[in-house]
Image (cartoon, rainbow, N blue to C red):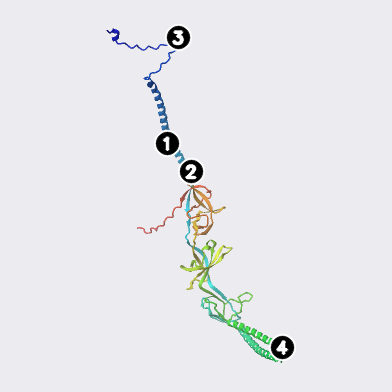
Amino acid sequence: MSTPSSTTPQKKPAPAMATPASPALAKTPAAPAQPASPATQPAAAGPALTHTGFWMVLIVALLALGALFYFFAIVPRLADAHALDREQKISTQRVVIYAVARSAAPKTELPLPGTMEAFQQASIFARTTGYVKKWNVDIGDHVKEGDILAELDTPDVDQQLSQAQATAEQAQASLAIAQTAASRWDTMVKDHAVSQEEADEKDATRNEAQATFDADEANVRRLTDLENFKEIRAPFTGTITYRNIQVGNLVTAGTGTVATGTTELYRIAQTDPLRVYVDVPEADQRAIKPGVGADLHVSSYPDRVFHGSVVRSAESLDITSRTLRTEIDVPNPDGALLPGAYTDVRLQLVDPTPAVLIPANTLVVNASGTQVALIENVDGQDKVHFLPVKVGRDFGTEVEILQNVREGDRLITNPPADMNDGAVVIAKPLPPKPTPTPANTAQKA
């Protein structure tokens, strides 16, 4: 049978209120801690794990905020600073205009001054002394080789010829007598009728007579030739360009020197073809060969072009002018061209290695010589480099360069005097020339 105490529910004791420990109790040693039961261990580790995760999340969040701040705040500022620095550098660089060097055409015209000369020309003097009996031609007359230009009356030469002929006849008679005597004495020597010495004397007399006769005959031929010079003849086909002769004038034999006092009677020139001499610069002498064509322009025929060709050159440069003397022959069948005329010669040169042409305003002439300002791309920047050059022919707006410049090189036009070698510039090409358009002259009323 159960007792009342077993059926009545028991109340849990209320928790004791903490009271301050008395000094006596504080000195009492505490009881050793009991090990926690397995049910209570997980409840103690939970707060520690939550604290570590909080710091890890915080660190990741800070790193993310730092990265966002770097990419959205620092990077744009660095880019802006770099762009500003670049703009400042560009603003300090000089803008220059450049022209591109080009190769000259393989076939070029070389203009040179020239003077036309007769193909051959001769001054005619009297070969014998006498008086002018007749003259047959005047200036401008065309004559052929052997035509009689004038006739002289030579009484002195006529008398000298007659005397020489008579002397030769005497010498011939003396020779005949000497030959007969020598033959007789040679026969008598064989018969021992005369001595050998006498026969030798007769042979010597015969030889002397022969020599005298030969000399007289030579004198006759000389005077005969002088007699033939009474007729003044043309030495070749050509045109009479000068006459200084009148009927009755006394002319003397000679070559027109002051000492002899002789004068030039005629001057004759062959005008078909004509010769033209030009002096070719040293830079172009390599292109001069026989057969090179030449166009000639004269002021008297402005609408006509005469054609010739190179026939020879001096094959040596003139030490004073450094030029090559070159001869050009020009056909002149109609006589339109006259000796002594000035002509503008344009040689048609073909150069297998054409030179480089650059604008004339790219040249710099200073104490260092003649230079050009070349633009070179170095590490992505255009820098200036001054090059010494050697100038060839001058074509006005362009000049020929013989060294250091190649086709396609960029050269600064009108380089400033204060520009230094190695300066960084902003290069811009020379703007193309505007294409001319016909003016609109028709206007509506």
Residue 14 higher or lower than 195, as above or below: above
Provide the residue designation for mark 4: 196
Q: Position of residue 173 (x, y in %)?
A: 65, 89
The C terminus, quarter of image: bottom left
Q: Which mark is residue 89?
A: 2
Q: Earlier in the sequence, mark 1 or mark 4?
A: 1
Q: Which mark is residue 429?
A: none
Q: CA distance from mark 3 to mark 1?
A: 68 Å
Provide the residue designation for mark 1: 71
The amino acid pointed to by label 2 is Lys
Provide the residue designation for mark 3: 24
Q: Position of residue 160 (x, y in %)?
A: 63, 84
Element assignment for label 1:
helix
Q: Position of residue 292 (x, y in %)?
A: 49, 66
- Classify residue 31 as left or right of residue 341: left
Q: CA distance from mark 1 to mark 4?
A: 147 Å
The N terminus, quarter of image: top left
The amino acid pointed to by label 4 is Gln
Q: Going by the picture, which residue comes out furthest to the left?
A: 1
Q: Earlier in the sequence, mark 2 or mark 3?
A: 3
Q: CA distance from mark 2 to mark 1?
A: 26 Å
The amino acid pointed to by label 3 is Ala
Q: Position of residue 366 (x, y in %)?
A: 55, 53
Q: Is there CB contact under 8 Å for labels 2 and 3?
A: no
Q: Earlier in the sequence, mark 3 or mark 1?
A: 3
